[in-house]
Structure formats: structure tokens, C-alpha cells
Amino acid sequence: MTYDSSFAQHRLTQLTEQLLSDTSVSGNIIFFADEEEGRVGGATWQFEDEDHSLLKDSDFTYMLMELLDVLIRYRASHGVTDTLNGIIQMDKSVPDMQWLTASEAEKRRGSLNPTV
């Protein structure tokens, strides 16, 4: 199977449209991979309280973490292991995903003001 660089963004957009189609949430999710386990090791959610509650109530938080596990394994299976961490910026429920190195993700986490 050939690596598809748009796969992650496409799947994230599908999940967001499925679970958040009638909402307008804005904020950031910075996630970190546990490379030994091949899955998400942690995430920082930066949303207003109301938006964060909406994400939990819609099961978006759970489903996103499951999706991130799949996406991390997908990248690793194609040898893309230098950027297994990242940030998802939500603007009015429209996601934009950016893959980062661990140090870049740490810098982004430190540079953004957490709201939750």
C-alpha cells in the first residue's frame, strides 16, 4: 500500500463532520505519541469549558483518540516516524491537522494559552 499524505486530514474531517456537524467549537488539541506502544501517549485539550463539554458529550474526545492511534500506526508503518506528534486546530468545528516532532509539539503546547 502506498502512503497517502492526505489520509489523516481526510479521516479527521470525516469524524468531525459526523460528530460535530451542528456545532461551532474552536480550540486546539496537541497530542504526543508513545512511539514504543505505537499509539497516543497523551494530549492537551485547549478549549473553553462549554466547547470541551460538547466534545466529551458527543464522544468526539474518545473517537479522536482512537483515530489518532490508527493514524500514528499508519505513519509508522510507512516509515514516517520523525513526526508522530501534532496539533489539531479547530476553528468553528473545522479541523486542521499538522504533524510535528516531539520537540515542536512541546513548544506549541508551551506557546498556546490553555483554556481547559
Image: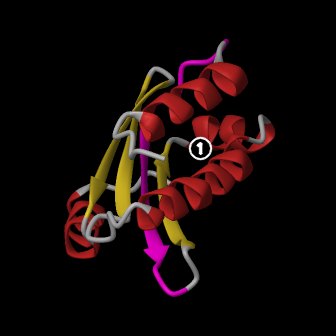
Could you say which is closer to the camera, residue 6 or residue 45? 6
**Image point (60%, 56%), residue name:** 70
**Residue 39 placement (x, y as % from top left):** 57, 71
Residue topped by disc 1: 49
Q: Residue 30 falls in which quadrant of the image?
A: bottom left
**Image point (51%, 87%), residue name:** 36
Could you say which is closer to the camera, residue 46 or residue 98? 98
**Residue 69 placement (x, y as % from top left):** 60, 61
**Residue 75 placement (x, y as % from top left):** 42, 59
Asked whether, in this view, residue 64 is left or right of residue 71, the answer is right
**Residue 62 placement (x, y as % from top left):** 73, 52
Q: Is residue 82 above or below residue 46?
A: below
Numbered disc 1: secondary structure? helix
Q: Residue 90 falls in which quadrant of the image?
A: top left
**Image point (37%, 33%), residue name:** 6
Asked whether, in this view, residue 60 is left or right of residue 35, the answer is right
Residue furthest toward the top? 22
- The reply to whether the magenta stretch includes residue 87 is no
Q: Is residue 5 above or below residue 84?
A: above
Asked whether, in this view, residue 99 is left or right of residue 49, the answer is left
Asked whether, in this view, residue 100 is left or right of residue 71, the answer is left
User: How many badges with numbers are in the image?
Assistant: 1
Q: Is residue 77 above or below residue 19?
A: below
Could you say which is closer to the camera, residue 36 or residue 27? 36
Residues in magenta?
A: 22-36
**Image point (71%, 46%), residue name:** 63
Could you say which is closer to the camera, residue 30 or residue 81? 81
